[in-house]
Image (cartoon, rainbow, N blue to C red):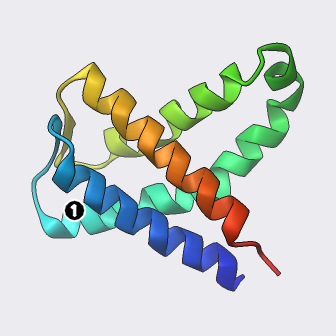
Amino acid sequence: MTGFLLRIIINAAILVMLAVKLPGIFVDTLGGTLLGGAIIGLANAAIRPLFMLTALPFNLSTLGGITFMTNIFTPFMVVKALPGFQISSALASIAGVLLMTLCSLTLSKIIHDR
């Protein structure tokens, strides 16, 4: 359980850094950024593995394309639900998703639930 919570917190911090550093991703307030980061961190830590299990047969046939799509749609579902988040360009969204995916994958490999 502590690994799960640690991944949520680190994913939230990564989202805050992405919102600050990437042009094209805007957040109105720091509180909104932290709330969005916590929700996206929770979605990446809890919902994404469920998507991955259900999409495993399709993932094998598309050579990982479903994983990429899952990583794109999980943050977008959360961002659309939260007021104050804006993504202005497709390049910023793809860069954000790729960086978030890389960080989330690294966290999953380093931090295990015990």
At horizontal 77% and vertical 14% (from top left) the residue drawn is 62
Task: Give the quarter of the figure containing the N terminus.
Answer: bottom right
Relative to 48, does residue 91 appear above or below in the rendering? Answer: above
The residue shown at (23%, 51%) is 19
Query: Judging from the image, what secondary structure is the residue with disc 1 in?
Result: helix
Side (left or right) of 19 relative to 58: left
Q: Can residue 76 be seen here? A: no
Give 15 or 98, whichever is nearer the viewer: 98
Residue situated in front as seen by the camera: 89 or 86: 89
Task: Using a 10 Å C-alpha cutoff, classify the residue at mark 1 as few (fewer than 14 neighbours), some (14 to 19) or many (20 or more).
Answer: some
Which residue in the structure is indicated by mark 1? 32
Q: Position of residue 79 (x, y in %)?
A: 34, 43
Q: Quadrant of the C terminus?
A: bottom right
Q: Is residue 24 above or below residue 35?
A: above
- Judge from the rendering whether residue 5 lies leftward or rightward of residue 20; answer left or right: right
Looking at this view, name the residue that lies furthest to the left.
28
The quadrant in which residue 108 appears is bottom right
Number of numbered discs overlaid on the protein picture: 1
- Tag 1: amino acid: Gly
Residue located 63% across and 51% down the image: 105
x and y percent of residue 106 in the render?
A: 61, 57
Check the image and name the residue furthest to the bottom. Answer: 2
Query: Can see residue 57?
Result: yes
Locate residue 105 relative to residue 74 in the image: left or right.
Answer: right
Where does the image place residue 95, in percent across and percent down from the top left? 35, 33
Q: Residue 76 location, x and y as percent? A: 41, 36
Q: Is residue 56 above or below residue 91?
A: below
Q: Residue furthest right?
A: 57
Identify which residue is drawn at 44% across, 60% down: 39
